[in-house]
Image (cartoon, rainbow, N blue to C red):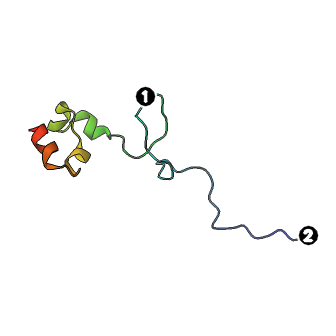
């Protein structure tokens, strides 16, 4: 019997950053899945000035209504 040639399109394992799973739950320290939104070493050593207020970059790209903007001021 002659073996079949290997299939070059077959992939093995999981990617280190999971984009196939939905991130729709609260973050937890016990969760080991990397969704690609973890801060890198530079962000941990030199946090953004808004991080002390609990804001991140995604908060500035959200669309807010006029009532929500007035509430935050």
Instruction: Please give the residue where the numbered disc 2 appears in the rendered image.
Output: 1
* SS at circle 1: loop
Give the number of the disc on residue 53: none
Examine the rendered structure and indicate whether residue 7 appears above or below residue 21.
below
Label 2, label 1: how many angstroms apart (C-alpha)?
A: 52 Å
**Where, by quadrant of the figure, is residue 26 drawn?**
top left
Image-based side of 5 in relation to 56, left or right = right
SS class of the residue under badge 2?
loop
Q: Quadrant of the N terminus?
A: bottom right
Residue 5 in the image, given as x and y percentages of width and height: 75, 70
Q: Which residue is mark 1?
A: 29
Q: Nearer the viewer, residue 69 or 14?
A: 69
In the image, residue 51 sits, relative to residue 18, either above or below, namely above
Tell me which residue sits at (16%, 37%) in the image.
50
Give whichever of 54, 69 is nearer the camera: 69
The crowd level at tag 1 (other Cα within 10 Å; few <14, some 14-19, many 20+) is few
Q: Looking at the rendering, in which quadrant would you find the C terminus?
A: top left
């Amino acid at each position: 019997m002659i073996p079949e040639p290997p299939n070059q399109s077959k992939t093995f394992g999981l990617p280190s950053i999971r984009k196939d799973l939905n991130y729709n739950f609260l973050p937890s320290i016990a969760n080991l899945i990397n969704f690609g939104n973890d801060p890198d070493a530079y962000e941990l050593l030199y946090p953004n000035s808004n991080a002390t207020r609990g804001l991140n970059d995604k908060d500035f790209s959200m669309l807010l209504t006029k009532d929500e903007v007035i509430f935050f001021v």
